[in-house]
Image (spheres, rainbow, N blue to C red):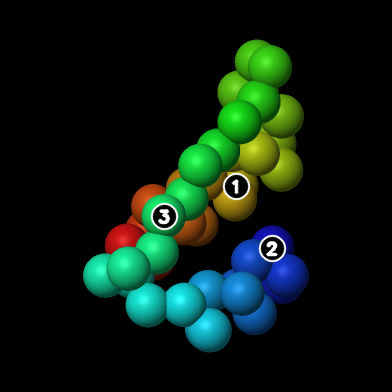
């Protein structure tokens, strides 16, 4: 989402770590954010 994009602008992909937690990993927002973070790396 927009918030994630703003956060990613301030991070360095060589030093950033993402931890994604979800009960089912089926929520669209979780999937979208996880995919966006993965693509960013």
- In the displayed structure, does residue 41 sit left or right of residue 8? left
Marked residue nearer the N-terminal end (2 or 3): 2
Do tag 1 and tag 2 residues touch (Cβ < 8 Å)?
Answer: yes
Q: Identify residue for label 1.
A: 32
Marked residue nearer the N-terminal end (3 or 1): 3
Residue occupying the far bottom of the picture: 10
Q: Residues within 10 Å of mark 2 (few under 14, many from 20)?
A: few
Relative image position of residue 16 (x, y in whole percent): 40, 64
Marked residue nearer the N-terminal end (1 or 2): 2
Residue visible at 32% across and 62% down in the picture:
41
1 shown above or below 6: above
SS under mark 3? loop
Residue occupying the far left of the picture: 14
State how far apart marks 1 and 2 are (Cα). 8 Å
Residue visible at 47% across and 50% down in the picture:
18
Q: Identify residue for label 2.
A: 1
1 shown above or below 19: below
Relative image position of residue 10 (x, y in whole percent): 53, 84
Relative image position of residue 38 (x, y in whole percent): 39, 52
In the picture, the disc for residue 17 is 3
Residue occupying the far front of the picture: 15
| 13 vs 28, nearest the viewer | 13
4 shown above or below 23: below
User: Closer to the observer: label 2 or label 3?
Assistant: 3
User: Closer to the observer: label 3 or label 1?
Assistant: 3
Q: Which quadrant of the view contains residue 21?
A: top right
| 14 vs 39, nearest the viewer | 14
State how far apart marks 3 and 1 are (Cα). 17 Å
């Amino acid at each position: 989402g927009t918030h994630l994009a703003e956060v990613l602008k301030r991070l360095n992909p060589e030093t950033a770590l993402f931890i994604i937690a979800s009960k089912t990993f089926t929520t669209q927002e979780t999937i979208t954010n996880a995919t966006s973070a993965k693509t960013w790396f």
